[in-house]
Amino acid sequence: MNSESVEVSLDRLVTLANACLRTLGLDDVERRIVSEVLLYAELRGNSQGLIKIVERSILPEPDKQPMQLARRAPSIAHWQANGNIGMVVFDAATRTAVDLCSKSGLAIVTTSGCSSSSGALGYYASQIAEQGYIALCMAGSPKVMALHGSSAPALGTNPLAFAAPTNSASLVVDMASASISWFDLLLYAREQRTLPDNVAVDRAGHPTHSAEQAIEGAILPFGDAKGSALALILETMTGPLCAAAILGDQQDYRGHCVVAIDPARVGEERTTGSGDDFQTRLTTMLERMRSNNVRLPGEASAQRAQQTRLSGRILIPGWLLRELELLCAN
């Protein structure tokens, strides 16, 4: 078992993460974006955090070229990543979506041409919601998940994030369409933990509790046929729609799709100050749900992040701290 945790100061962890990114050759802009995305996840206990540094899943292509933006229509744009870092590309797509949405009330921005991780999509969706817009963020990923009823990898774990502004903290839903994310699987393998039931199969298609066997086999979709259908929708939105990698392609060039909607331009006209605007109505709806003692999606992880920032301390796996320190020492 390799799952002991150690407590470190948040300041030390931020400094260490940035030092590692510098060691890996990221420039100032890349380090700022990547560290923000990774720490957003780490503070929430999300597997899309600092493990990506030691797994080297945040690196650009060696022959990367400058990204290129193509406007397809007043509210549609496409970024050609040209081998740049997935998180940097997604950040650019997010900023473009906000800009287009501010002008037309609706934006669809796609990307293609990178093979590194996009990170926790809730980060980008939150950025859009903070501007007063509704966000849908979708990302393609390596083909490691089987369709329901099959054991052959055919889909990515294909995450989806939704965010909407309220009168307080934004509503953020961030999820994968798989029973377990790829980086959760890597964590299970590193810490020699047993997988839960019904999340993966081995190379022969047999159910497995071994993370190592699952890595060689396939992850299963959550919710059986329904999860499989959702994954297929996301595969369509981040593959063919983006002119990005699909099953069978040799090059792993993943696609992203960002949708931003200005709720003030949707539905009936609303009178300013009437208390009937979108944010007020959504806030009221969520408060009524909480009155039934329910915890809404994303709230627990957001509270965890807030508490960590207030305390200035964070628990991380001991092996992760050691590997980060070793990387900086080389």
Image: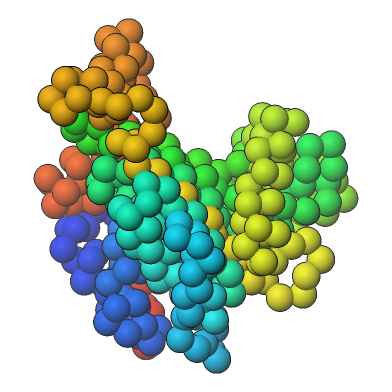
Residue in front for this viewpoint, 37 or 327: 37
- Seen in the picture, residue 63 relative to 220 is either above or below; the reply is below
Tell me where residue 247 appears, x and y as whole percent.
Answer: 78, 61
Q: Is residue 71 visible?
A: yes
Q: Quadrant of residue 96?
A: bottom left
- Seen in the picture, residue 22 relative to 140 is either above or below; the reply is below
Tell me where residue 19 appears, x and y as whole percent.
Answer: 27, 79
Question: Is the C terminus in the top left, top right, bottom left or bottom right quadrant?
Answer: bottom left
- Seen in the picture, residue 160 relative to 89 is either above or below; the reply is above
Residue at 19 percent across and 58 percent down: it is 10
Residue at 22 percent across and 36 percent down: it is 169
Residue at 38 percent across and 79 percent down: it is 327
Residue at 16 percent across and 49 percent down: it is 309
Extreme residue toward the right, this view: 204
Q: Is residue 117 visible?
A: no
Residue in front for this viewpoint, 49 or 78: 78
Residue in front for this viewpoint, 184 or 225: 225
Q: Quadrant of residue 243?
A: bottom right
Tell me where residue 163 appears, x and y as whole percent.
Answer: 37, 40
Q: How is the image coloured?
A: rainbow
Residue in front for this viewpoint, 50 or 196: 50
Extreme residue toward the front, this view: 269
Tell me where residue 281 appears, x and y as whole percent.
Answer: 28, 21
Determine whether, in the image, residue 75 is placed left or right of residue 99: right
